Image: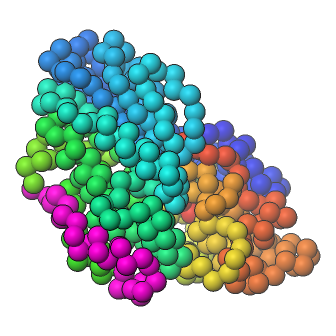
Amino acid sequence: MHPERFLTTSLRSHPRGESVMRILSAAMRAVEPDEAVRRFVQREGQTLIVAGQVYDLEKTGRIRILGLGKAARAMTDLLAECLAGHTPRGLLIPKQAFNSLWAGFEVQPGGHPIPNQNSLQAAAKALELVQNLSENDLLICLVSGGGSALMSAPQPGLTLYDLQSLTCSLLACGARIDEINTLRRHLDRLKGGGLARAAAPAQVISLILSDVVGSPLEAIASGPTAPDPTSKADALGVLKKYDLTGKIPSAIFKALENAPETPKPGDGLFARVQNFIVGSNLLAAQAALAQAKSEGFIPHFWGAAWQGEARDVAKTLCKKLKSDAKRPFCMVAGGETTVTLRGAGLGGRNQELALAAVNELAGVENVILVTLATDGEDGPTDAAGAVVTGDTKKRAQAMQLDPDAFLNENDAYHFFEPLGDLLQPGPSGTNVNDLIFLFGF
């Protein structure tokens, strides 16, 4: 991704703005889907090598490819090229529709972040793709962010409305993504190892671009080819934790009671399944820090497991930004925060974190805070995050913009838009959670 796609008013006017944009760009380039697949997949004659594992294509029967998630297109294109001559058949389930360049590949977009009728169609086509495979056949899954909503096969007795209502309630109450996916795994026939079970006894390879903090296999796209360490009791516990009993369809509880348990670690089903993480938040952060060092910044990494309310995380990170660390520095933190909705505004967790930082950094000299959703889309907006400096509040007041009022309405988008400090690089085609950059000069 070209650095200038991160240009904002504050970065344009800052003497180190170009350096900041190059650091953001380096983070994104490190997790571009095609590069992630290329690092793990090679073809040597009739041999396919995946993460050091060797597969003899001459002894392989049918090859099926399932691309699931926001990076489906870029991940699949490279693999399809690698397997040219073996006429693989494939299904791509992205967020946006596009025309496949490969014969034998169908594109079926799903719904995101709320599953819709397209998500049901995508699941039905995925089941058709993997049914009746034999032990000599090979299924290669290319999994990336958004897969949980894009493909949905509800357990018997559940309707699409039931899942939509549950998802909306979980997003609104501030539930973490791992908690949301715990429920999804137990309410869906393809999640929590369900796809691997449907494809058995075929050999299954999953190349996974992680969009979940810590990269637990069962949480990424709700683990369609991974064992599920959680139980139906854990799923019920999430509903109780957020006091959703009586607020969601009763069919959800009935399904949790009647659905079979998901396959667990140690299940023989997974003896013929290999899951590989090919890209993650940590990789993006490391690339950013390396670029920062080359730009003359002192790099600091604050971990890739930041979670919790966006506005609370903002306060903690601003304290680090205001520290007496030797300058110039670039601090990077990764993870995925949450937002408990209080108002009817527009924004996402990255923009909310930035808005919560405005008062914290007001009047502080020579600092910049940047928030970035690596998929290029933060919440239901065309922004990936925002830029905050010590002058942001002063500039906002001159426009009669009160950061507290906008924060109360969860309306970060309309706060930063007139300031020209929304990051709007466009959809990136990848997703490895969020990054927060703290610069001191």
Nearest the viewer among 51 and 285 is 51
Q: Is residue 421 left or right of residue 34?
A: right
Q: Residue at x 21, y 18 (%)?
A: 57
* Residue 183 in the image, given as x and y percentages of width and height: 34, 69
Residue 255 within the segment the image draws in magenta: yes
Q: Which residues are magenta?
A: 239-266
Q: Residue at x 43, y 44 (%)?
A: 122
User: Which residue is situated farthest in the front direction here?
Assistant: 157
Q: Residue at x 28, y 65 (%)?
A: 186
Q: Is residue 331 left or right of residue 211?
A: right
Q: Is residue 181 above or below residue 360?
A: above
Q: Residue at x 71, y 74 (%)?
A: 345
* Residue 65 in the image, given as x and y percentages of width and height: 34, 31
Asked which quadrant contains residue 202, the reply is top left
Asked which quadrant contains residue 403, the reply is bottom right
Nearest the viewer among 197 and 229 is 197
Q: Is residue 222 visible to us here?
A: no
Residue 375 within the segment the image draws in magenta: no
